[in-house]
Amino acid sequence: MPALNRVRHLSQSIACPWQLAYDYLCVPEHFCQWASGLASGMQRIDGQWLATTPQGQVRLTFSPPNSYGVLDHWVHITPQVSIYVPLRLVANGEGCELILSLFRQPGMSEERFAADAQWVQRDLLTARQLLEAL
């Protein structure tokens, strides 16, 4: 049986219509407004998204716009190391749920994993506040 990474599913309920939330969140430039790890800015150069993060400059790849609420993205730390970030927006009545699956990376301490989960939860709250103000 293959080894599995530990995962935490983090979410925020958002009082914003699903389509409005999705139309905003699927724009890569908008990630900087709620994802604090990218708060230093993102730019598109030669068809690639580059962001300045606390760990330095990284390349990002985003899932294409779709009708399923998939907002997955990949953070390419180095040419050999990429982190997959599953992110979903799910309709919930007149609002929606924003759900991120956080995988514990190989070699990551339990303390660092917990700190990353807290960081992501703060970012999801920021996304909620931003979307509810639209």
Image: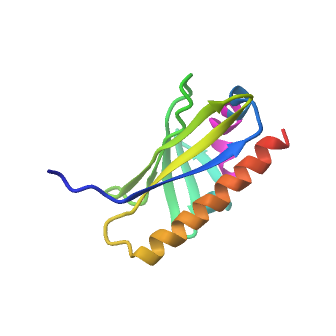
Task: Please identify the quarter of the rendering in which residue 76 is found.
Answer: bottom left
Q: Residue furthest right?
A: 133
Magenta residues: mostly which secondary structure?
A: helix
Residue 33 visible in the shown view: no
| Image point (59%, 49%), residue name | 11
Magenta segment, which residues? Answer: 22-33
Position of residue 32 in the picture relative to residue 88 (left or right): right
Which colour scheme appears in the figure? rainbow
Residue 32 covered by magenta stretch? yes
Instruction: Tell me how many marks there are.
Output: 0
Q: Residue furthest top?
A: 67
Position of residue 11 in the picture relative to residue 93 (left or right): left
- The percent position of residue 73, horizontal first and vertical second, equals 49, 44
- The percent position of residue 23, horizontal first and vertical second, equals 69, 30
Relative vertical location of residue 107 with respect to residue 57 in this rendering, above or below: below
Residue 81 visible in the shown view: yes
